[in-house]
Amino acid sequence: MNKYKRLSHSVWLCTYHIVFCPKYRYGILEGKSEVFVRNQLYRLCGQKDQMSIEEINIQPDHVHLIISISPKYSVSETMGYLKGKVAVRLFEHQKELSRRYWGKHLWARGYCVSTIGLDEEALVG
């Protein structure tokens, strides 16, 4: 199976392992929050051209994503898009989060990212 993807003038395989967590690392990603965040991440990636989630693992206090992103999008642009949209939608969906996260800041500022090559994929799973 060919894992490489094509654009009009390039062939690419850009897969990243990204980890991000809620502010203060509160364990809020359980139950209905976990399901909602998972569904929103899949939906948001489906709306962008050439962006797909290969694997996702949501723990109560952090999210692991294996994501394939076209070279036309930067990782920081992608994370700003995903974290921002998910936060807004989660606050709308679960009003009680506003008491814990005043100011509508759900996610911690940063994230951890590493590239995944063809040989590394076996190590992550």
Image: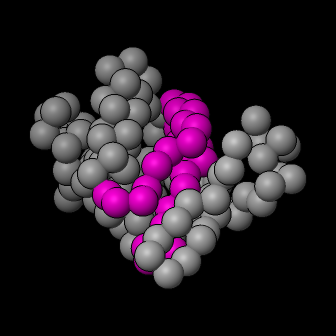
Residue 30, placed above or below residue 9: above
Check residue 52 for magenta coloring. Answer: yes
Check residue 37 for magenta coloring. Answer: no
Query: Which quarter of the picture shows residue 5?
Result: bottom right
Q: Residue at the spot x=33%, y=46% of the render? A: 46
Question: Which SS type dominates the magenta stretch?
Answer: strand
| Quarter of the figure that contains the C terminus | top right
Residue 65, placed above or below residue 35: below
Q: Residue at the spot x=52%, y=66% of the render? A: 6
The range drawn in magenta is: 48-74
The residue nearer to you, when weighing 102 against 69, is: 69
In this orientation, does residue 112 appear? no
Residue 80, placed above or below residue 51: below
Q: Is residue 8 left or right of residue 68?
A: left
In this orientation, does residue 91 appear? yes
| Quarter of the figure that contains the N terminus | top right
The residue nearer to you, when weighing 89 against 48, is: 48
Q: Position of residue 60 (x, y in %)?
A: 51, 31
Query: Which quarter of the picture shows residue 16?
Result: bottom right
